[in-house]
Amino acid sequence: MKQELSHSAAGLCAAVFFFILGLTSAAALAVHSIDSTASSSKADILSTDGEKGFQEDMEKGKLFEAVLNGELSAVKSILAKKPELIEAENQRKSTPLILAASAGHEKVVSWLLDCGAKKDADNQFGRTALHYATKGNYLSMVRLLINKGANPDGVEGSPLTPLHLAAENGSKEMAALLIDAGSDVNKLDGKGKSALFYAAKHGNEKAAEYLKEAGASGAEEENFGPSLYLRNLHMGSAYMWKLKDRGWAVKTKDHLFIFDNEEHSMRPDRPLLANGFVSAEELKDQNVMAVYTAYHADAYAKEFVHALDDQLDDITYLHFKKDQLQGNRNALFIGGQGMIQIKGAEVSYSEEMDREGMGWQTYLIRSGGVEFFYSGFLGAEGDGHDTTLHHFKSHSKGCDLAFIQLSAMPRRSDYEFFGKVIAALNPKKIFLHQPLGTPNQRVLQEMEKRYPGREFIIAQDPGERFHL
C-alpha cells in the first residue's frame, strides 16, 4: 500500500470492514460500532435451528452490508425474496432503516419508508433513524423522516432526543426543523440536561439563541466566542479539548497543539474548540503546532488546519517523514528517533511500524511546564514499543498526560501497551480515544480494574474540555 494514501484511509477501511461484519449477526468477531464496542462469539451467532439459523443470519448480513453501502438495487433484491427482513435487527438492535440513516443513504431510507419500515424503531441505545440523521446533519433526510411521521423526540425512554444532537452539532436550521415538527425544547436527557445546555456548552450561539426564542432553558455554561481558557495559563497548567472527528487540542502556557486534526462532519455555524473544531478566529496568536502521527487523508486533500497556513503567521506543521502532503510553510517532516527543539517546545519522537509496513510517529512533548505522551495512529498495533518507550523514558522529566489510541476492538495487546506506558512514563492522567467513535464504559472499567489508582478519562462529547 502506498504511504501517500491516507493512513486513516487504510485504518478507516479496516474499521468499516469490521464494522460491517459486526452489523451482521453472522460475524463471529468483536467489532466497533457507532455507539460502542461489543463482542460476539459463535454462540451468539448460531440459533437453536443450527444451519437454518446460520443461513438466515447470512441473509441479514448481506442486507446490512448493502444498506450500509447504499446499494439500493441490492436492498430491493434481497427484500423481494425475504420481505420480513425489513425489520431485521443486528446485534445492537439496529434495523435496516436505522443503518441507512446512520450511513447517510437517503434514497435507501426513502424506499424503506415507502415499503413500510417502522419509522420509530429504536436500537439498544434508544436511538431511532431520526437520531442518526440528525447526528449526521442530513437535513433533507430529517425532513423526509418527519414528513413520514417520525416522532421528533424519538421514542419514550430514549436517553436523549434528536434536538439534543442538533444543539450539540450547532445547526440552527436543524434545531428549527425539529422544533417546528413538535420537539420538546425543554426535554431532559439521561443526564438531566436540556438541548440548550449542549448548545451553550459547545459554543453554538445561533442554535442557543434560537432555542431560547423557542422557550428553552437550562444553560449552565456559555462558551460563545474564542475560549477564555486559551489565555493566561501558568507554568504546569494545560487545557485539553476533544476534537470532533479525530484528534485533540492541548493548550499550554507557551503553545497550542492540534493533534491529528481530521474533519468529516459538517462544520457548525461558528466553529470553535468548544464544539470540537479549529478556526483561525480562535487559533490566532496562539503559537500553534499542528502535529500528525501520520497524515490521515489523501495527500492532496488537506484537512482544515492546513488551510490556516495563509491565515496564521505563527503556525508550524509537524509531519511523519513519509507523509506526502506538501505546500505548507513552516512544515517539518521527521522520522526515526530523536529529540528536537521547536519554537520553545521540546519534542521527542519515535517512528513505529505495523506488520504490513505502515509507519507513523509517536511523540513525547514538553511545553510550558507540561509533559505529554501522544501515541501513534494505530496505538498498540505497532512493533517496537519497548524501544520507543525506552527512548521517551530517557527524555522524560515527569509525564503529566498520556493520549492513547485504542484499537477498533480493544484486546489484550491494548491493555499490555497501556501497562508499558504506565511503567515507563507514569502519567498522571490518561485519555483513551478510539477511531470512528468513543470507547465505552466497559473499557474504562477494565482499565481502572487493571491499573488501580490511575485516572483514566474518556471524552464523551466533541469539544469536551479538561484541565490539568
Image (tube, grey):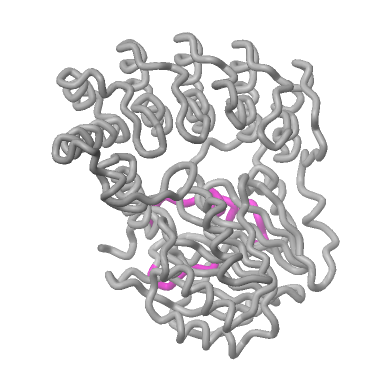
Q: Nearer the viewer, residue 330 or 375?
A: 375
Q: Nearer the viewer, residue 196 or 395?
A: 196
Location of residue 399 (image quadrant): bottom right
From this view, report whether residue 139 is shown above or below residue 59: above
427 left or right of 317 in image: right
- Which residues, given as a range, are shown in magenta? 298-322
Q: Where residue 105 sits: x, y (%)?
A: 36, 27
Residue shown at the point (80%, 29%) measured from the top left: 218
Per the image, is 320 magenta? yes
From this view, report whether residue 376 is shown above or below residue 65: below
Q: Quadrant of the C terminus?
A: bottom right
Q: Where residue 215 sits: x, y (%)?
A: 78, 17
Q: Quadrant of the N terminus?
A: bottom left
Per the image, is 237 magenta? no
Location of residue 270 (image quadrant): top right
Q: Where residue 157 sits: x, y (%)?
A: 59, 26
| Outermost residue, bottom side | 394
Location of residue 51 (image quadrant): top left
235 left or right of 331 in image: right
The mark tally for this picture is 0
173 left or right of 328 in image: right
Residue shown at the point (45%, 70%) measured from the top left: 320
From this view, report whether residue 137 is shown above or below residue 143: below
Q: Where residue 273 sits: x, y (%)?
A: 68, 48
